[in-house]
Image (tube, grey):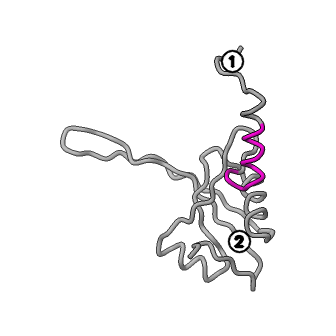
């Protein structure tokens, strides 16, 4: 028994959000394609490869579906990388820099996308 069961209103609002493109959800993971802005990512862009941050629970198939839905281009290849947490110190206090997951998406030559909306 769940503490807060989903009501019909909540289910209807979720389906409307998905149709509106607010959040693409598959199963339990919610995918967000956020551009990863670095010098290395800019070099990859010249070779028709785009680097984006995704949800830590995202899979290649989910990233492929989201990319096709958002940009209308079928990717040739998707490589996933998991960036681990890194310890950081501030005096005697030890904390951690947040970890994340990246996807390097290769598109066919000649196809360009505007990953940075203007």
User: Residue farthest to the front?
Assistant: 9
| x, y percent for residue 18 | 75, 49
Residue visible at 60% across and 67% down?
51
Is residue 49 found left or right of 99 in the rendered image?
A: right
Q: Residues within 10 Å of mark 2 (few under 14, many from 20)?
A: some
| x, y percent for residue 37 | 50, 69
Where 109 sits versus 100, above or below? below
Q: Nearer the viewer, mark 2 or mark 1?
A: 1
Local secondary structure at mark 2:
strand
| Front residue of 65 and 87 | 65
Indicate whether residue 14 is drawn in magenta: yes
Q: Which region is colored magenta?
A: 12-23
Indicate whether residue 33 is drawn in magenta: no
| x, y percent for residue 31 | 66, 51
Residue visible at 19% across and 38% down?
92
Query: Residue 1's quadrant in the figure?
Result: top right
Return the mark for residue 62: none
Mark 2 or mark 1, which has the lower sequence index?
1
Residues at circles 2 and 1 in contact by the CB criterion of under 8 Å: no
| Front residue of 48 and 26 | 26
Where 26 sits versus 102, above or below? above
Residue ID for mark 2: 106
Residue visible at 69% across and 18% down?
2
Return the mark for residue 2: 1
Quadrant of the frame with the C terminus: bottom right
Is residue 17 found left or right of 74 in the rendered image?
A: left
Local secondary structure at mark 1:
loop
Magenta highlight: main SS:
helix
């Amino acid at each position: 028994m769940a503490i807060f069961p989903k009501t019909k209103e909540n289910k209807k609002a979720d389906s409307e959000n998905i149709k509106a493109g607010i959040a693409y959800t598959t199963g339990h993971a919610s995918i967000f394609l956020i551009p990863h802005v670095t010098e290395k990512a800019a070099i990859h862009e010249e070779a028709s490869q785009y680097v984006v941050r995704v949800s830590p629970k995202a899979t290649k198939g989910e990233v492929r579906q989201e990319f096709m839905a958002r940009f209308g281009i079928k990717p040739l290849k998707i490589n996933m990388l998991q960036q681990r947490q890194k310890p950081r110190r501030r005096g005697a206090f030890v904390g951690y820099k947040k970890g994340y997951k990246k996807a390097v998406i290769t598109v066919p030559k000649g196809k360009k996308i505007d990953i940075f909306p203007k």
